[in-house]
Amino acid sequence: MKYYILFGPPGAGKGTHSGAISEKYNLKHISTGELLRAEIAAGTELGQKAKSLIAAGSLVPDEVVEGMIENVFNTVKDYDGFLLDGFPRTLAQAEALDSILAKREECVTAVVSIMIPDELIYKRIANRAAIEGRADDADQSVIKHRIDTYHSQTEPLIAYYKEQGKYFEVEVTAPTIEENRERVLALMETIE
Ligand code: ADP
Protein backbone atom coordinates (compact mmCIF):
# COMPACT_ATOMS: atom_id res chain seq x y z
CA MET A 1 0.00 0.00 0.00
CA LYS A 2 1.07 3.57 -0.65
CA TYR A 3 0.94 6.12 2.16
CA TYR A 4 1.19 9.65 0.79
CA ILE A 5 1.09 12.72 3.00
CA LEU A 6 -0.37 15.84 1.41
CA PHE A 7 1.43 18.58 3.29
CA GLY A 8 1.16 22.37 3.34
CA PRO A 9 0.01 25.38 5.33
CA PRO A 10 -3.70 26.00 6.01
CA GLY A 11 -5.38 27.27 2.86
CA ALA A 12 -2.71 25.92 0.47
CA GLY A 13 -5.36 23.82 -1.27
CA LYS A 14 -4.83 20.37 0.22
CA GLY A 15 -8.56 19.66 0.17
CA THR A 16 -8.90 21.18 -3.29
CA HIS A 17 -6.27 18.97 -4.93
CA SER A 18 -6.84 15.80 -2.95
CA GLY A 19 -9.70 14.65 -5.20
CA ALA A 20 -7.65 14.62 -8.40
CA ILE A 21 -4.70 12.89 -6.74
CA SER A 22 -6.70 10.23 -4.94
CA GLU A 23 -8.72 9.45 -8.07
CA LYS A 24 -5.67 9.16 -10.30
CA TYR A 25 -3.79 6.85 -7.92
CA ASN A 26 -6.79 5.04 -6.40
CA LEU A 27 -6.05 6.35 -2.93
CA LYS A 28 -8.42 6.70 0.01
CA HIS A 29 -8.43 10.39 0.95
CA ILE A 30 -8.35 11.01 4.71
CA SER A 31 -8.71 14.60 5.91
CA THR A 32 -8.45 14.85 9.70
CA GLY A 33 -10.10 18.30 9.53
CA GLU A 34 -13.09 16.84 7.65
CA LEU A 35 -13.32 13.89 10.04
CA LEU A 36 -13.30 16.29 13.00
CA ARG A 37 -15.97 18.51 11.42
CA ALA A 38 -18.12 15.39 10.85
CA GLU A 39 -17.76 14.50 14.54
CA ILE A 40 -18.85 18.02 15.48
CA ALA A 41 -21.83 17.88 13.11
CA ALA A 42 -22.85 14.51 14.57
CA GLY A 43 -22.61 15.94 18.09
CA THR A 44 -20.36 13.15 19.37
CA GLU A 45 -18.36 13.47 22.59
CA LEU A 46 -15.15 13.70 20.56
CA GLY A 47 -16.73 16.42 18.41
CA GLN A 48 -17.77 18.40 21.44
CA LYS A 49 -14.25 18.30 22.83
CA ALA A 50 -12.72 19.29 19.49
CA LYS A 51 -15.15 22.11 18.73
CA SER A 52 -13.72 24.90 20.83
CA LEU A 53 -10.12 24.02 19.95
CA ILE A 54 -10.87 24.15 16.22
CA ALA A 55 -12.85 27.37 16.61
CA ALA A 56 -9.82 28.92 18.33
CA GLY A 57 -7.49 27.69 15.58
CA SER A 58 -5.60 25.39 17.96
CA LEU A 59 -4.71 21.78 17.28
CA VAL A 60 -6.76 19.00 18.85
CA PRO A 61 -4.76 16.53 20.98
CA ASP A 62 -2.43 14.20 19.08
CA GLU A 63 -4.09 11.00 20.41
CA VAL A 64 -7.46 12.08 19.02
CA VAL A 65 -6.30 12.37 15.41
CA GLU A 66 -3.96 9.38 15.70
CA GLY A 67 -6.92 7.22 16.77
CA MET A 68 -9.05 8.47 13.87
CA ILE A 69 -6.29 7.70 11.35
CA GLU A 70 -5.66 4.20 12.66
CA ASN A 71 -9.37 3.53 12.59
CA VAL A 72 -9.58 4.38 8.87
CA PHE A 73 -6.49 2.27 8.08
CA ASN A 74 -8.19 -0.67 9.78
CA THR A 75 -11.55 -0.35 8.05
CA VAL A 76 -10.77 0.64 4.46
CA LYS A 77 -10.26 -1.86 1.64
CA ASP A 78 -10.15 -1.77 -2.17
CA TYR A 79 -7.68 1.07 -2.48
CA ASP A 80 -4.03 1.09 -3.54
CA GLY A 81 -3.17 3.34 -0.64
CA PHE A 82 -4.00 6.46 1.34
CA LEU A 83 -3.71 10.20 0.89
CA LEU A 84 -3.34 11.80 4.32
CA ASP A 85 -4.50 15.41 4.27
CA GLY A 86 -3.80 17.54 7.35
CA PHE A 87 -2.07 14.71 9.21
CA PRO A 88 0.55 14.54 10.65
CA ARG A 89 0.70 18.10 11.94
CA THR A 90 3.17 17.66 14.83
CA LEU A 91 6.39 15.71 15.28
CA ALA A 92 4.61 13.49 17.82
CA GLN A 93 1.95 12.67 15.21
CA ALA A 94 4.63 11.88 12.62
CA GLU A 95 6.31 9.48 15.04
CA ALA A 96 2.96 7.92 15.95
CA LEU A 97 2.22 7.46 12.24
CA ASP A 98 5.55 5.69 11.81
CA SER A 99 4.71 3.26 14.59
CA ILE A 100 1.13 2.70 13.39
CA LEU A 101 2.57 1.88 9.95
CA ALA A 102 5.39 -0.25 11.38
CA LYS A 103 2.78 -2.46 13.04
CA ARG A 104 1.33 -3.02 9.56
CA GLU A 105 4.84 -3.57 8.12
CA GLU A 106 4.38 -0.42 6.04
CA CYS A 107 5.95 3.03 5.92
CA VAL A 108 5.30 6.54 4.58
CA THR A 109 5.78 6.53 0.80
CA ALA A 110 6.30 10.25 0.22
CA VAL A 111 5.34 13.71 1.41
CA VAL A 112 3.78 15.87 -1.30
CA SER A 113 4.17 19.41 -0.06
CA ILE A 114 2.17 22.25 -1.57
CA MET A 115 3.55 25.63 -0.61
CA ILE A 116 2.27 29.19 -0.60
CA PRO A 117 3.57 32.28 1.17
CA ASP A 118 1.71 33.51 4.29
CA GLU A 119 0.18 36.53 2.47
CA LEU A 120 -1.58 34.20 0.08
CA ILE A 121 -2.92 32.08 2.93
CA TYR A 122 -5.09 34.98 4.10
CA LYS A 123 -6.50 35.51 0.57
CA ARG A 124 -7.21 31.83 -0.01
CA ILE A 125 -8.90 31.42 3.37
CA ALA A 126 -10.97 34.57 2.87
CA ASN A 127 -12.23 33.12 -0.45
CA ARG A 128 -13.02 29.80 1.18
CA ALA A 129 -14.87 31.48 4.06
CA ALA A 130 -17.33 32.91 1.56
CA ILE A 131 -17.89 29.48 -0.04
CA GLU A 132 -17.76 26.95 2.80
CA GLY A 133 -18.83 29.06 5.79
CA ARG A 134 -16.32 27.54 8.24
CA ALA A 135 -16.21 29.56 11.48
CA ASP A 136 -12.43 29.08 11.79
CA ASP A 137 -12.01 30.74 8.37
CA ALA A 138 -13.97 33.87 9.25
CA ASP A 139 -11.81 35.42 11.96
CA GLN A 140 -8.45 37.06 11.21
CA SER A 141 -6.98 36.34 14.64
CA VAL A 142 -7.94 32.65 14.37
CA ILE A 143 -6.31 32.47 10.92
CA LYS A 144 -3.17 34.11 12.32
CA HIS A 145 -3.09 31.59 15.16
CA ARG A 146 -3.41 28.70 12.66
CA ILE A 147 -0.52 30.11 10.59
CA ASP A 148 1.62 30.55 13.72
CA THR A 149 0.78 27.00 14.81
CA TYR A 150 1.74 25.75 11.36
CA HIS A 151 5.13 27.47 11.55
CA SER A 152 5.92 26.36 15.11
CA GLN A 153 4.46 22.84 15.23
CA THR A 154 4.02 21.57 11.67
CA GLU A 155 6.92 23.07 9.72
CA PRO A 156 9.53 21.01 11.65
CA LEU A 157 8.11 17.97 9.83
CA ILE A 158 9.77 19.22 6.64
CA ALA A 159 13.22 18.50 8.08
CA TYR A 160 11.99 15.19 9.52
CA TYR A 161 10.90 13.90 6.11
CA LYS A 162 13.76 15.54 4.18
CA GLU A 163 16.19 13.53 6.28
CA GLN A 164 14.40 10.40 5.15
CA GLY A 165 14.52 11.51 1.49
CA LYS A 166 10.72 11.51 1.33
CA TYR A 167 9.99 15.22 0.94
CA PHE A 168 8.79 16.63 -2.43
CA GLU A 169 7.66 20.25 -2.69
CA VAL A 170 5.89 22.39 -5.28
CA GLU A 171 4.72 26.02 -5.19
CA VAL A 172 1.00 26.35 -5.81
CA THR A 173 1.01 30.09 -6.43
CA ALA A 174 -0.45 30.01 -9.98
CA PRO A 175 -3.61 32.09 -10.41
CA THR A 176 -5.93 29.20 -11.28
CA ILE A 177 -6.83 25.98 -9.45
CA GLU A 178 -6.33 24.00 -12.71
CA GLU A 179 -2.78 25.26 -13.15
CA ASN A 180 -1.91 24.44 -9.55
CA ARG A 181 -3.51 21.02 -9.86
CA GLU A 182 -1.33 20.32 -12.93
CA ARG A 183 1.74 21.28 -10.89
CA VAL A 184 0.76 18.93 -8.06
CA LEU A 185 0.02 16.04 -10.42
CA ALA A 186 3.32 16.66 -12.25
CA LEU A 187 5.16 16.48 -8.93
CA MET A 188 3.40 13.20 -8.10
CA GLU A 189 4.65 11.80 -11.43
CA THR A 190 8.26 12.39 -10.36
CA ILE A 191 7.86 10.33 -7.18
CA GLU A 192 8.88 6.63 -6.95
P1 ADP B 1 -6.74 23.76 7.11
O1 ADP B 1 -6.06 22.95 6.06
O2 ADP B 1 -7.32 25.02 6.60
O3 ADP B 1 -5.90 23.98 8.31
P2 ADP B 1 -8.18 21.45 8.20
O4 ADP B 1 -9.55 21.03 7.79
O5 ADP B 1 -7.05 20.59 7.79
O6 ADP B 1 -8.02 22.93 7.64
O7 ADP B 1 -8.10 21.59 9.79
C1 ADP B 1 -9.04 22.35 10.52
C2 ADP B 1 -8.75 22.29 12.01
O8 ADP B 1 -8.90 20.94 12.48
C3 ADP B 1 -7.31 22.65 12.42
O9 ADP B 1 -7.14 24.05 12.57
C4 ADP B 1 -7.18 21.89 13.76
O10 ADP B 1 -7.87 22.57 14.79
C5 ADP B 1 -7.94 20.61 13.49
N1 ADP B 1 -7.05 19.55 12.97
C6 ADP B 1 -7.06 19.01 11.71
N2 ADP B 1 -6.09 18.10 11.58
C7 ADP B 1 -5.43 18.04 12.76
C8 ADP B 1 -4.31 17.31 13.25
N3 ADP B 1 -3.64 16.43 12.46
N4 ADP B 1 -3.89 17.53 14.53
C9 ADP B 1 -4.54 18.39 15.33
N5 ADP B 1 -5.58 19.13 14.93
C10 ADP B 1 -6.04 18.97 13.66
Image: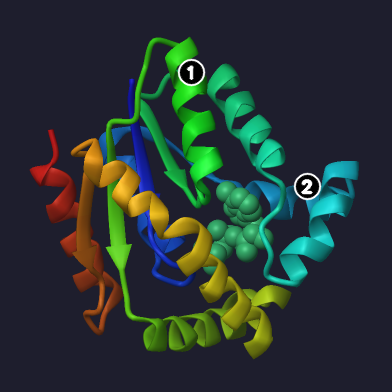
Q: Residue at x 19, y 53 (%)?
A: 185
Quarter residue 83 falls in: top left
Q: Position of residue 13 (x, y in %)?
A: 40, 67
Compared to residue 147, the image places residue 8 above or below, namely: above
Q: Is residue 143 left or right of residue 10?
A: right
Q: Is residue 183 left or right of residue 122?
A: left
| Disc 1 element | loop
* Number of other residues with Cα within 10 Å of mark 2, as a class: few under 14, some 14 to 19, many 20 or more: some
Q: Residue at x 59, y 19 (%)?
A: 75
Q: Is residue 134 visible?
A: no
Q: Position of residue 188 (x, y in %)?
A: 18, 46
Residue type at the position of mark 2: Glu
Labels 2 and 1 touching (C-beta < 8 A):
no
Compared to residue 126, the image places residue 56 above or below, namely: above
Quarter residue 123 falls in: bottom left
Number of the label disc, if any, that sits on residue 164 = none
Asked whether mark 1 and ligand 1 are closer than 8 Å, the reply comes as no
Q: Position of residue 82 (x, y in %)?
A: 41, 33
Q: Position of residue 152 (x, y in %)?
A: 50, 65
Compared to residue 184, the image places residue 104 above or below, namely: above
The residue beneath circle 2 is 39
The residue beneath circle 1 is 77
Q: Residue at x 14, y 40 (%)?
A: 191
Query: Nearer the N terminus, badge 2 or badge 1?
Result: 2
